[in-house]
Image (cartoon, rainbow, N blue to C red):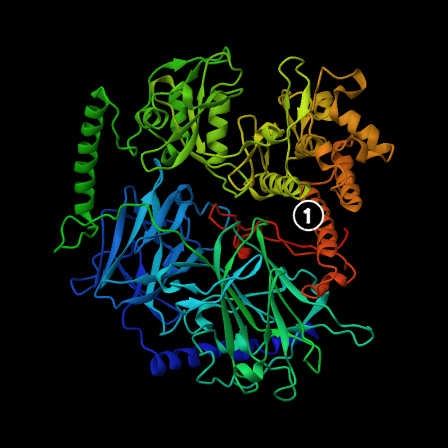
């Protein structure tokens, strides 16, 4: 019946865009609208919008574009929209300028479709003084465009959108939408919610830019832009339900919602958001229906969000019989009374809050029955979550020719101009290389040392082979010297197999980690090349990003994003100087450790299954798991990694890795598979649990090897006896038991018997849920604000993952529609 329910309104859903545009024409007109097809010389019609080509759009056009160039997809996919067959590329900071705009809030959308080599782009985007996207990369793992939406306040009659490449990379965009939002789109003063409960009134919201993170059609299906009054996208809510069995879809409401003057409008959300809902799945056989329906969303830690909940009472038989509670986190609740709010059945309304996220990395939204309700249920129709962006530190680019907008000229003129510009840049770059002091040179002109060199092997390598690497990431040596203050020893933060690591700051203010190879450190050109090749074609929130590389003057230098908290090992244990015996240093809670393990597993899972051909890391260990300022884990160091086609079951190769973490089967048989990473990760899990190194020669023989020692205690059923003393009494036995099972599976002798990283991730998620549910029960056992915890744990449900979308390295934990591996946790596997 569920499938019939959904299909029953697919036909009327097709009709909504006719009424939507009728509404747009009659009740609301766009005073300024910009729909731009970037890099195109012709116009494109998409969802009744005319996207104007920005190549010579005409003197009457009210926008201009700064210095940039255009690119066209030579072999476009037949499924690709014409909008995604061209793009505009920015090699230097440049901008679009929009004039004659009215003041107020603008809806701004950017369309990114990485055809050709556009997946290598790394850039930031700011608008009207707000930093909208920072160190943004689309990647090449998705066959669908990435669309980023913002609400931006505009004043002064014009506004600019700046694209700023990071390092030696570039920026691009396929299409831009910018139009004035309806009046009272967002209120300036809104109730403020903190994790501790209700705060003071939040004032000045209209002066902030908002980034849309989630837009959920609760109880319904996907709503596409052509079916929305403001061309928005809405996705179903099922993936975010904490307990899927606690809610059910309400019957579809066939009439038009009864919009009231004091309530929502068709521009708040389209009709079909209000025609569907989720309500409590009340079991008549239960003695008590005192539980909540909870949705769980990944968010950035300690950030500020705008939350809008949409309601339309399509489930009550009559008005005034239903009231219920709406919760944000555990401490905030408000009673929703449709009769008091709107005074009409099937009449849409919404409630808005500014919400501070806590340090958990997720936000809970719940509904539940109130004592004053006669039918004991609750409902929700839609939900929007937007993050307040920070001010931009980027300096806006001013067009030098104010009266004559600069456009890219096409045809034969471009060819002649390109040759002249390239010649000029080469001559200028040559002059810069003769300069004695550090200068910024044009990173788009590669410079290669001639001849050959030798590093840590006896092989002589032709440096010109580096020319096959990603030139978009190439950085000049002068920038490296500037960033590290000529490799100041005070900035050195570590030393590894590749060489010394320095903390640095690029000219644009970006903090980076700079790894400089040195002779005699064991790793050489092949590792340098492997790292660049692999990291230039993958990007994931839980993999350390490569910002650039330098191969000038026989140097081998890698530049990464800077990870504030260092390695995982730094937070687990250290060595006493006099005895060299390891000692626990960790003050990480069990929850934090599990989240670090889960993040690392997500990164490795992406390597194994989400990247082209599959990648085996081959050196998984606690020093190759780095933590950012919020303790988000990212896997690093891909110098020993191997990649191959998906159908390749193993590799015959020399044994490489780190002692204590090496897969014994790999060591014996010289056959490397992804299950070798699983074994190494099992050792890391034990490190996290016990806060001691994988090998410790200061210990008795039977305790030296952590994997063997840990498994001996696991087989005795006494794993709790080797837990880090800091965690003593703080781990729920069920969580520890599940964690121990995961470790045991990872460390099995035969690789084929070990689980996949996806299964490891699954079980770690469940171990965390066991810990959190018990803690919540203990903490809130006297509270009714989350009565859903009283429900028995239902069976685990896994979402289908026939396609594995790319996880971008954005500020947000990935937007749910882009999450690489989505799990609906609720019970044991």
Q: Position of residue 545 (x, y in %)?
A: 47, 37
Residue 160, quarter of the rendered image: bottom left
Residue at the image position 63 percent from the left and 42 percent from the top: 592
Q: Position of residue 679 (x, y in %)?
A: 71, 31
Q: Position of residue 95 (x, y in %)?
A: 26, 51
Q: Position of residue 506 (x, y in %)?
A: 35, 33
Foreground residue among 195 and 685: 195
Label 1 SS: helix
| Outermost residue to the right | 716
Residue 789, quarter of the rendered image: bottom right
Foreground residue among 214 and 429: 214
Residue 120, quarter of the rendered image: top left
Foreground residue among 372 and 702: 372
Residue at the image position 77 percent from the left and 58 percent from the top: 793
**Which residue carries the number 1 mark?**
765
Against 596, residue 366 (above or below) is below
Against 650, residue 790 (above or below) is below
| Outermost residue to the bottom | 318
Horizontal side, residue 61 vs residue 332: left or right: left
Against 368, residue 732 (above or below) is above
Horizontal side, residue 456 vs residue 477: left or right: right
Q: Does any portion of residue 724 appear in the rendered image?
A: no
């Amino acid at each position: 019946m569920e499938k019939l329910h959904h299909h029953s309104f697919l036909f009327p859903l097709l009709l909504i865009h006719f009424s939507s545009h009728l509404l747009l024409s009659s009740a609301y007109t766009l005073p300024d609208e910009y729909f731009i097809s970037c890099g195109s010389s012709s116009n494109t019609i998409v969802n009744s919008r005319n996207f104007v080509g920005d190549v010579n759009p005409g003197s009457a056009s009210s926008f201009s574009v700064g210095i940039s160039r255009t690119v066209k997809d030579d072999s476009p996919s037949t499924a690709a929209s014409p909008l995604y067959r061209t793009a505009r590329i920015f090699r230097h900071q440049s901008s679009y300028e929009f004039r004659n705009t009215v003041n107020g809030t603008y809806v701004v959308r950017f369309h990114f479709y990485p055809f050709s080599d556009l997946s290598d782009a790394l850039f930031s985007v700011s608008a009207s003084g707000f930093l909208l996207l920072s160190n943004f990369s689309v990647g090449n793992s998705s066959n669908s465009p990435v669309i980023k939406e913002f609400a931006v306040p505009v004043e002064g009659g014009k506004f600019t959108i700046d694209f700023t490449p990071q390092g030696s990379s570039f920026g691009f965009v396929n299409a831009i939408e910018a139009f004035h939002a309806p009046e009272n789109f967002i209120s300036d003063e809104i109730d403020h919610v903190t994790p501790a409960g209700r705060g003071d009134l939040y004032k000045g919201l209209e002066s902030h830019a908002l980034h849309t993170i989630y837009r959920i059609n609760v109880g319904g299906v996907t709503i596409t832009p052509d079916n929305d009054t403001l061309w928005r996208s809405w996705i179903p809510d099922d993936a975010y339900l904490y307990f899927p069995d606690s809610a059910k879809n309400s019957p579809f409401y066939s009439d038009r919602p009864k919009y009231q003057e004091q309530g929502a409008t068709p521009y708040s959300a389209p009709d079909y958001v209000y025609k569907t809902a989720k309500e409590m799945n009340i079991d008549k056989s239960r003695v008590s229906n005192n539980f909540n329906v909870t949705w769980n969303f990944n968010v950035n830690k300690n950030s500020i969000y705008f939350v809008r909940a949409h309601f339309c009472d399509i489930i009550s038989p009559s008005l005034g019989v239903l009231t219920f509670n709406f919760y944000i986190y555990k401490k905030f609740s408000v009673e929703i009374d449709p009769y008091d709010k709107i005074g009409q059945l099937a009449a849409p309304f919404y409630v808005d809050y500014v919400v501070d996220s806590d340090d958990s990395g997720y936000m809970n939204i719940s509904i539940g029955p109130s004592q004053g309700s006669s039918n004991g249920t609750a409902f929700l129709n839609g939900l929007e979550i937007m993050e307040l962006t920070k001010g931009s530190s980027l300096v806006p680019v001013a067009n030098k020719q104010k009266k004559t907008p600069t456009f890219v000229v096409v045809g034969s003129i471009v060819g002649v101009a390109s040759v002249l510009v390239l010649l000029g840049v080469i001559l200028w770059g040559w002059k810069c290389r003769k300069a004695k002091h550090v200068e910024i040179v044009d990173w788009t002109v590669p410079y290669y040392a001639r001849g050959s060199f030798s590093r840590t092997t006896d092989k002589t390598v032709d440096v010109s082979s580096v020319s096959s690497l990603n030139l978009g990431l190439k950085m000049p040596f002068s920038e490296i010297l500037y960033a590290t203050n000529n490799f100041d020893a005070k900035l050195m933060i570590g030393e590894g197999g590749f060489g010394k690591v320095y903390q640095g700051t690029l000219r644009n203010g970006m903090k980076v980690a700079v790894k400089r190879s040195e002779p005699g450190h064991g790793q050489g050109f092949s590792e340098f090349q492997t790292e660049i090749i692999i990291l230039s074609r993958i990007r994931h929130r839980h993999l350390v990003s490569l910002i650039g590389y330098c191969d000038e003057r026989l140097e081998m230098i890698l530049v990464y994003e800077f990870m504030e908290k260092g390695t995982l090992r730094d937070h687990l244990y250290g060595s006493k100087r006099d005895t060299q015996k390891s000692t626990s240093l960790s003050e990480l809670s069990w929850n934090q450790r599990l989240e670090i393990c889960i993040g690392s597993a997500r990164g490795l899972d992406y390597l194994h299954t989400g990247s082209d051909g599959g990648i085996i890391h081959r050196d998984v260990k606690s020093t190759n798991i780095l933590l950012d300022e919020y303790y988000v884990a990212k896997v690093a160091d891909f110098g020993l990694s191997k990649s191959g086609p998906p159908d390749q079951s193993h590799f015959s190769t020399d044994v490489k890795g780190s002692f204590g973490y090496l897969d014994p089967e790999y060591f014996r048989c010289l056959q490397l598979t992804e299950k070798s990473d699983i074994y190494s990760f099992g050792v890391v899990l034990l490190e996290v649990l016990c806060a001691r190194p994988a090998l410790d020669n200061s210990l008795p023989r039977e305790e030296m090897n952590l994997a063997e020692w840990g498994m001996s205690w696991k087989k005795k059923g006494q794993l709790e006896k080797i837990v880090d003393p800091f965690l003593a009494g703080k781990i729920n036995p069920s969580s520890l038991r599940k964690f121990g099972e995961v470790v045991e599976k990872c460390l099995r002798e035969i690789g084929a018997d070990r689980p996949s990283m996806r299964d490891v991730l699954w079980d770690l998620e469940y171990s965390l849920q066991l810990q959190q549910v018990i803690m919540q029960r203990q903490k809130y056992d006297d509270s009714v604000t989350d009565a859903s915890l009283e429900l028995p744990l239902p069976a685990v449900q896994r979402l289908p993952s026939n396609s594995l979308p790319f996880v971008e390295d954005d500020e947000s934990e990935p937007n749910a529609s882009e999450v690489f591996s989505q799990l609906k946790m609720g019970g044991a596997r």
